[in-house]
Image (cartoon, rainbow, N blue to C red):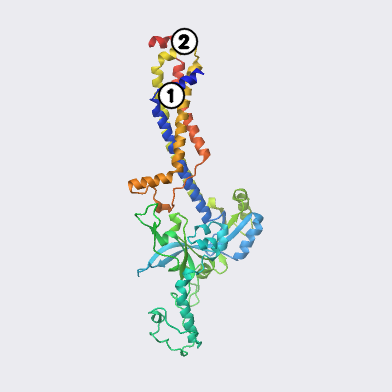
Amino acid sequence: MYKWLLAWRYLRTRYLALASIISVMLGVATLIVVNSVMAGFASKLRDRLRGLLSDIIIEHRSDSGFWGVEHKVQQVYEILGDCVEAVSPAIETFGILQYSYPHSREVISRPVLVIGIEPGSRARAGQFAQYLYRAENRIQPERCFEVRGDIALRFGRVMEYWRLLQERRRGVKPGFPLSPLEPNFDSRLGRNPGELSSEHELPTPEPPQLPPELREPAGIILGYSIATYRRPDAHVSDAEKDIFLLRPGDRVTLMLLTAFDLPGHDGTQGLPRPMEDTFAITDLFRSEMSEYDARLVFIHLRDMQRLRGMTNRAKSLYVKLRDYERDAHEAIRLLSTSEAFPPHSFLVQTWEERQGSLLAAIAIERGILNVLLFLIIAVAGFGILAIFYTIVVEKTRDIGILKALGASHGGICGLFLGYGLFLGLVGAGLGTACGIGITVYINEIEQLLAKWTGQEVFNRSVYYFDQIPTDLQLGMVLSVNAGAILIAVLASVYPALRAALLHPARAVRWE
């Protein structure tokens, strides 16, 4: 018992040990905060990657994809049985997006990754719906490409005028007077102003084709960073941090290459041809990851098939399992060995295998950072060793008296090991409390620092996260505490052995 009482007395009276306690505390707090923030980012990244893809991805190796979409979807259900929750076909290809900002005649072109999807099945196979910007589309994702509501109002008047124009050209008298809705509407149709003002049938029997800028377009969903940018002076507390350059209802032009070589006019085999169409923005896609929000564009699968000449074809199948952890390995085996998806034509992967290099890089980065940060606690361990060695030198006479009174070698050694244990426990305890407090209130601390310094500590233009993500794990906290206490005890081993080996008579004579 005496050795624990003396160790506690040394801890309270030797203020030199305070430096070691502070070192251990800072090291433990830093490790907890950094690990929690990195785990939060990694967890959110994994969640986004899994939501953008699905549990299993079946991808055709050729750019032309596979034929018979519904048949292939049905085969997946037959092969995997009840473990399948949803299957969604898709086509991915690169394209050029052209648009102009309001009040600007400059046409902007940018390369994008275009994904053709069936929104209903895609929402069931992943987290597509929860990343949509408009609330009504999150509730009804199967209608996210429909030009409806306030978006349809922007085109409805022009479309109604064009319908009445067609009826008049066929000799059908409208039920109400016809009047242009735009001053330059007649000129855009290639007509002289007032040419269509008569209510009598016009000589031309068939109306011309509706110009692309006037017909009702198909819907398109743009990445959030394509349509917006973050204000340079925006603060996290600002209600409006992003400036919208494009909004739902604006028109954009999308250009793609056909998947097959189309024959030329002379009957010879030609090269893939560029196809373009005008789309109406029906929503924005906001995954809060700039890499995806700045280059992803979604259109309906049927529009992708029409533009690329891939009728009843798809490039990939996204498969959602009911229990990924339990069924993923067996599902991959069944699909890879099935005659419906031969390995020479199809690549079957889990989402983790698809993003393996990125996930491995994150794990390696996190491991290296942990090793580097743990050196902080190692430095504190060397401080404990130096302090203990100093105490052994100073207390040589006291050690000799204790041994002369009957203290054993093990008792003296346990005294200093207990002292090191107390230092580790106190430092780790204070560090844990400090680290957990910082982790829980890290966003409030970041806002306070940003207010004092005038600059954001966490740049939200990279991820568009409104808050710093954290993931406080009990296992990580316990392992950090165990490591800190172990280092403190190991650092006290050498001074404890030196004190235990002192001869009592020589220790008193030396004093």
Assess disc 1: are there few (<14), some (14-19) or many (≥20) residues with their C-alpha within 10 Å of its C-alpha. some
- Residue 247: x %, y % from top left: 43, 65
Q: Is residue 451 left or right of residue 127?
A: left
Q: Is residue 453 above or below residue 100?
A: above
Left or right: residue 294 versus residue 71 is left
* Residue that mark 1 sits on: 11
Location of residue 331 in the rendering, given as x and y in whole percent from the top left corner: 62, 53
Residue 414 in view: no
Discs 2/1, front: 1
Q: Is residue 366 above or below residue 311?
A: above
Q: In the drawing, what numbered circle is on residue 404?
A: 2
Q: Which residue is drawn at the image coordinates 42% and 35% (left, top)? A: 27
The kind of residue tagged 2 is Ala
Q: Nearer the viewer, residue 164 or 315?
A: 164
* SS for callout 1: helix
Decide if residue 437 is on the left or right side of residue 232.
right
Q: Earlier in the sequence, mark 2 or mark 1?
A: 1
